[in-house]
Amino acid sequence: MPHFIAKKENIKFPLQEGDFIFHNYFIDEKYPSQGLISVTRGKDLFFLRKNKHPLGFLFKAEKNTRPSLTGHLKDALSILSKHCEIISHNLSKNTPKQTTNSPFLLNPADILTQCNQPFMLEIGFGSGRHLLNLARKNPQLLCLGIEIHTPSIQQVLRQIEILNLKNLFISNLDARILTQILPSNLCEKIFIHFPVPWNKKPHRRVLTKDFLTQALRILAPNKTLHLRTDDEIYFQDALSLALNTHQSSFSINKNIAQEIISKYEARWIKQQKNIYDLEFKSLHFDQEISSNYDFSFPYSKEFNFPERIIEKDFFIHLNARFFSKDSILLSISFGDFNWPNTRFIQIDHQNHLIKFLGQPPLAIPANIKAHKRLITYLENQ
């Protein structure tokens, strides 16, 4: 992770250099010797963290707002380092891939823009063999791959350019969140091939009751979700999901060869492990959902709420408070218990605003309920 250690610092805010503006320094309420520096580059906002260190101060990224491009983070830290007495750093020269965004790597807003047409979805594509073949064989159809493993993402992005594919896009968004925002009835097929079983922690699985409900909603009528796994416990649990659904149509196969085989599947076949296929069919045309929700706040001089708010289907946790001359910064985690997100809320007394910094949260039910609860505390100040 890019960082530097400084014996002393002499940074004056605001500071502007190149594409970067360093706006303000927020002091941590509990640990006054450390804090956050707010930075913008164009429309992108992120924070740098200043922590106390045995040799002085450590400057690094705030992990929840870290820029998607490492090069931008390194550039911002390099600018700050000019105003410090540096002891050590790892701010080496940027490589091209550290400063260039792939047009095929989508953020949530991009996904909603792209997926307004029929598409196919693969969740956890790994090496990308199956996904790349899917895109090559269906050039007229949008293909979307979801993966959280960064090396796998980078590998497939390189292959997209080498193969000159125009219909394949990638996202690192959690699939359990993604399926809550995708439009209804447009997906032609969903593939989940060899997911991590999580047999000891089944709540961490991709395929759960709630996920299946959303997957069947986004599938067009008579289209299917295809699960392929070598784990019998996972297969049996998935089958139970199908059987416990009020109305369901599904098919099962065992040890049926596929056109594309990953190196891991080839190893399992060589070891004579059983491979299970379970396909869930969408039976209905589902009502469209709205992805629009206003996450704004009314202004109030005070914004006090309990450190922990826990309800059946959402939670709110105040992680930390930070202070500057005219603003208060709240770091909060909120939303779904299994897929929480951490955001910053700024209370700007100078401009009489309270707002989420950066992109607004995704309009999923747990986030909306958490926001509405925060509104009630504001209205009662």
Image (spheres, grey):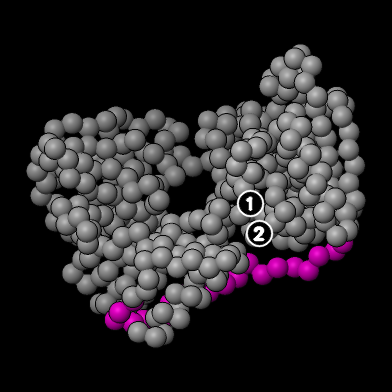
User: Could you say which is closer to the camera, residue 101 or residue 358?
Assistant: 358
Question: Circle 2: is it few (<14), some (14-19), or many (20+) Cα within 10 Å?
Answer: many
Query: At 57% from the left edge and 48% from the top edge, which residue is drawn?
Result: 173
The single residue placed furthest to the top in the displayed view is 270
Q: Is residue 131 visible?
A: no
* As drawn, 107 above or below 275: below
State the SS at label 2.
helix
Amino acid on which disc 1 is placed: Arg
Q: Which mark is residue 176?
A: 1
Residue 322, image x, y percentages: 26, 62
Amino acid on which disc 2 is placed: Gln
Is 209 placed left or right of 66 in the picture? right
State the SS at label 1.
helix
Q: Is residue 325 visible?
A: yes
Residue 64, image x, y percentages: 40, 51
Residue 21, image x, y percentages: 27, 56
Is 365 placed left or right of 370 in the picture? right
Q: Which mark is residue 289?
A: none
Q: Which mark is residue 180?
A: 2
Residue 301 shown in magenta: yes
Q: Tell me which corner region of the image, top left, top right, bottom left or bottom right, holds residue 22.
A: bottom left
Q: Which residues are magenta?
A: 284-303
Image quarter where the C terminus lies is bottom left
Residue 295, image x, y percentages: 49, 72
Q: Tell me which corner region of the image, top left, top right, bottom left or bottom right, holds residue 43.
A: bottom left
Q: Are marks 1 and 2 in contact (CB under 8 Å)?
A: yes
